[in-house]
Image (spheres, rainbow, N blue to C red):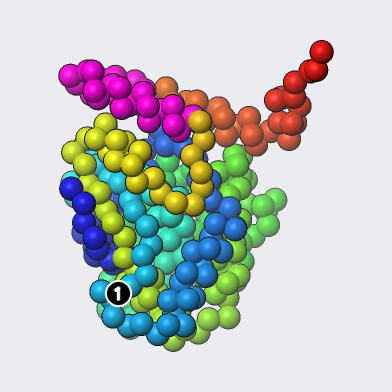
């Protein structure tokens, strides 16, 4: 089932967005965020206030999360969704108190008092993500060396770099300008595909893959295995095994590519 909606409607519809542990790590770099930022600026400059004609943000593919009511797992679109969430939170901090009360704290938080965010990234990144988001009201992040939890993977380095870039973009915004960008962003349109299980979601993901960062061979191989699993198996047991094992592979891959001597790891000798 697909729905052409606005970012605001999607965020209000679901209680929590969860990135499963078997997904690849956060892969967006500053250049990918710059493309999103330019799209947003262009939309602002057009001064189009009709939400029905909002700029197209992209697609996401989700499945119900069986452990949390009215929550979903994000199967595709996590890169753009994570980046958009970071931008929304940074803009939120610059809004007037009256505006924040009007929007409601439940828009970005699952539990505002506990500072539990509506977007739950993979478990390996969760504490690092929470740490950098705590600086969402600052002009920039502390240097990586001064963080309590230092970035240990390429994905965490990417999260740091992109969020720091976001803070730099809006550091001079007053509440009025922040409101303009926030409103335009939540009125951007996206297509949300909600599938009943992971296998169906990954088949959809094969057809409408999120633009931004090209898929690696590992991603394509995982999708192909899930496809054949759903075609020839009668239950979801094999899906779970594939996802669990590829989750480990993605984690090992991130560690390898974060290694300072990775160039020698993949070096080949000529005869």
Find residue 52 and report its image quarter: bottom left
Relative image position of residue 45 (x, y in whole percent): 46, 83
Task: Reply yes or no: does residue 54 show up in magenta.
Answer: no
Q: Does the magenta-highlighted stretch encompass residue 243?
A: yes
- Report the residue at 54% width, 74% height from top: 170
Residue 86 to residue 26: above or below:
below
* Element under disc 1: helix
| Residue that label 1 marks | 53
Residue 180, x across and y down, in percent: 41, 81
| Residue at the right extreme, as displayed | 271
Residue 239: give x, y in percent of width and height.
Answer: 30, 24
Q: In the image, what residue occupies the spot 42% across and 82% down?
A: 46
Visible residue check, residue 174? yes
Magenta part mainly helix, strand or loop?
Answer: helix
Q: Which residues are magenta?
A: 218-244
Q: Is residue 45 above or below residue 83?
A: below
In the foreground, 69 or 254: 254
Quarter of the figure with the C terminus: top right
Indicate left or right for 81 with 191 as reference: right
- Which of 270 and 181 lies nearest the eye of the viewer? 270
Up/down of 259 relative to 157, above or below = above
> How many numbered callouts?
1
Tell me the residue at 32%/83% (across/down).
49
Furthest residue in direction top, as rendered: 271
Note whether residue 138 is visible. Answer: no
Quadrant of res 263: top right
């Amino acid at each position: 089932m697909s729905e052409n909606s606005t970012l605001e409607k999607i965020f209000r519809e679901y209680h929590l967005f969860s990135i499963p542990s078997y997904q690849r790590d956060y892969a967006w770099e500053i250049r990918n965020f710059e493309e999103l930022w330019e799209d947003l600026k262009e939309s602002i400059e057009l001064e189009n206030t009709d939400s029905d004609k909002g700029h197209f943000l992209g697609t996401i593919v989700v499945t119900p999360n069986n452990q949390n009511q009215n929550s979903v797992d994000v199967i595709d679109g996590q890169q753009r969704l994570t980046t958009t969430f970071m931008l929304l939170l940074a803009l939120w901090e610059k809004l007037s108190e009256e505006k924040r009360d009007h929007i409601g704290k439940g828009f970005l938080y699952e539990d505002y008092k506990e500072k539990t965010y509506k977007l739950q990234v993979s478990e390996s990144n969760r504490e690092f993500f929470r740490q950098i988001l705590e600086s969402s009201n600052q002009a920039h992040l502390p240097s990586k060396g001064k963080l309590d939890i230092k970035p240990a993977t390429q994905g965490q380095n990417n999260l740091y770099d992109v969020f720091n870039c976001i803070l730099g973009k809006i550091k001079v915004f007053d509440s009025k300008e922040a409101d303009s960008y926030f409103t335009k962003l939540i009125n951007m349109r996206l297509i949300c595909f909600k599938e009943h299980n992971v296998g169906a979601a990954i088949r959809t993901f094969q057809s409408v893959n999120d633009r931004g960062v090209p898929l690696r061979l590992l991603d394509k191989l995982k999708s192909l295995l899930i496809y054949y699993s759903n075609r020839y198996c009668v239950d979801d047991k094999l899906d779970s095994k594939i996802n669990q094992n590829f989750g480990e592979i993605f984690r090992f891959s991130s560690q390898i590519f974060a290694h300072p001597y990775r160039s020698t790891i993949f070096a080949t000798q000529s005869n």
